[in-house]
Structure formats: C-alpha cells, structure tokens
Image: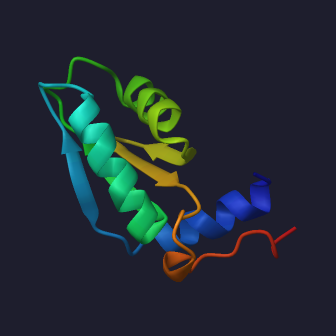
Amino acid sequence: MTSKQRSYLKSLAVNLDTIFQIGKGGVTDEICYQLLNALNAKELIKIKVLETSPDSVREVASIVADQTGAEIVQTIGTKIVLYRVSDNEKNRKIDIKRIK
C-alpha cells in the first residue's frame, strides 16, 4: 500500500465508528472470525483496544492483521484502523488501486 492510498483510507476512517473492542480476553479466534466477517462486509473498520487488554495496541494490530489478512492503515492512541478488500464483489466499495 502506498502512502497516498494509506492517506486516503485514513481520511475515510475519520468518520467511522468503532465496531469492536478488545479487552482483557485479548485476541481470540472468535474475535478474529468476527473481524474477518466485518472486513468482508465493510472493508474498512475501526477497533478500540481497552486498557485491560494483555497486549499493546500495536501487538493487537499485528495479530489481527496476520489472522485476517488485513492491512494496518493506522494505529493512533487506542484505536486501530484495518483495511481488507472484500471477498464478496457486491461489498467492494473502496477502490484504492486507482490512487497512485
């Protein structure tokens, strides 16, 4: 992902609501499955890592990105923004290939 593509995704993420919270249970297979479903539906999602999480924000971002095949757009404070092209063509709304 180029810096311009990342910048474009960041601008889209500003208006997104946080749809997942990761807390004291950490990153589980169930959470990764739910995140994968959310990424297939929306392509761009925002996650909040609570203070009770056993892992840091960057560790959580890395684990989730590896398990879902998503790319980390940004980590800022306790928030993570992830992007992944939807497997379902009907749900593909964001086209970053046109941005060079």
Residue 21: percent from the left, percent from the top?
20, 45
Residue at the spot x=66%, y=69% of the render? 8
Query: How many marks are shown on the rendered structure?
Result: 0
Please tell me which residue lies in front, 78 or 18.
18
Please tell me which residue lies in front, 42 or 58.
42
Please tell me which residue lies in front, 63 or 17.
63
Residue most extreme to the top: 54
Q: Is residue 43 above or below residue 72?
A: below
Residue at the spot x=49%, y=65% of the render? 43
Q: In this view, does 73 lie above or below 24?
A: below
Residue most extreme to the right: 100
Q: Is residue 36 found left or right of 19 in the rendered image?
A: right
Quarter-wise, where is residue 6 in the image? bottom right
Task: Name the quarter where the C terminus is drawn.
Answer: bottom right
Q: Is residue 24 found left or right of 34 in the rendered image?
A: left
Q: In this view, does 48 lie above or below 66?
A: below
Residue 68: percent from the left, percent from the top?
47, 41
Residue 34: percent from the left, percent from the top?
27, 49
Q: In this view, does 60 lie above or below 92?
A: above
Q: Is residue 52 found left or right of 63 in the rendered image?
A: left
Residue at the spot x=33%, y=49% of the render? 35
Please tell me which residue lies in front, 9 or 91.
91
Residue at the spot x=52%, y=73% of the render? 12
- Display coloring: rainbow
